[in-house]
Image (cartoon, rainbow, N blue to C red):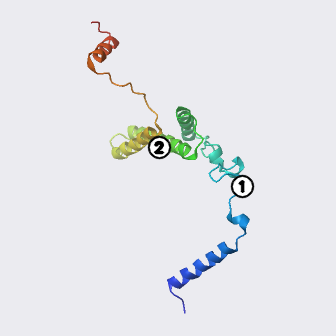
Amino acid sequence: MLGRASDFSIGVTSRVTKVLENRTAAASTPSPLRAVGADLPKQQRARRTNDPLAGIETNTARGRRIADLVRAYLRAVGNPVDIERQAAVIAAAELQVLAEEARAAALKQAGTCDLDRVVRIEGAAARAVKRLGIGRARQPAQTGLAGLLVADRARGHSP
């Protein structure tokens, strides 16, 4: 006769506890050679972590465009070394290429394509790029009479 599910979980829990109790001290304590929060050596990290362009197939036009955007975005954000930032850059580049392809397909199939899909993809790509902090640097708006005079001079108006 089969036991209840709770009997099974109690058995698993007791086995896990026994394994943890029987571990040697070397297996249960962190290595003294490396700090707890330290980065892993290059040989112990994923290939894509070491080279963000490793997973991108550059034999196709799409892959080359993604690689170009990844390089440009990485340069724009200061060539980050943290994995999360690199992953955000790759995702933004891939979304941008998808948006470009959706827009091109919409132009070819005028009247028969799903424009909502194009708008959604372009919005997602724009948000991903915005999250990276890439964009035009805005100048602070000048207020008051001095600000208006400076703006008029910039437009070519003289007082």
Is 5 drawn above or below residue 31 in the view shown?
below
Looking at the image, do the residues carrying marks 2 and 1 touch, with CB atoms under 8 Å apart?
A: no
Choose top left, top right, bottom left or bottom right for residue 72: top right
Using the image as rendered, state which of residue 36 and residue 128 is in the foreground.
Answer: 36
Give the amino acid type for the residue marked by disc 2 in the picture: Leu
* Few, some or many residues within 10 Å of mark 2 (<14, 14–19, 20+): many
- Residue at left offset 57%, top offset 41%: 63
Q: Which mark is residue 141?
A: none
> Furthest residue to the top?
159
Q: Secondary structure at mark 1?
A: loop
Classify residue 97 as left or right of residue 82: left
Is 25 drawn above or below residue 84 in the view shown?
below
* Few, some or many residues within 10 Å of mark 1 (<14, 14–19, 20+): few
Residue 1 appears at what percent x and percent y? 55, 93
Residue position for label 2: 95
- Residue at left offset 45%, top offset 42%: 128
Residue 28 appears at what percent x and percent y? 68, 65
Residue 85 appears at what percent x and percent y? 53, 43
Choose top left, top right, bottom left or bottom right for residue 12: bottom right
> Furthest residue to the bottom?
1
Q: Quadrant of the C terminus?
A: top left
How far apart marks 2 and 1 lie (CA) works out to 42 Å
Task: Give the mark nearer the N terminus: 2 vs 1.
Answer: 1
Q: Secondary structure at mark 2?
A: helix
Give the amino acid type for the residue marked by disc 1 in the picture: Pro
Q: Which mark is residue 32?
A: 1
- Residue at left offset 62%, top offset 51%: 37
Classify residue 98 as left or right of residue 46: left
Is 9 drawn above or below residue 82 in the view shown?
below
Residue 43 appears at what percent x and percent y? 72, 49
Which numbered mark, 2 or 1, is in the foreground of this view? 1
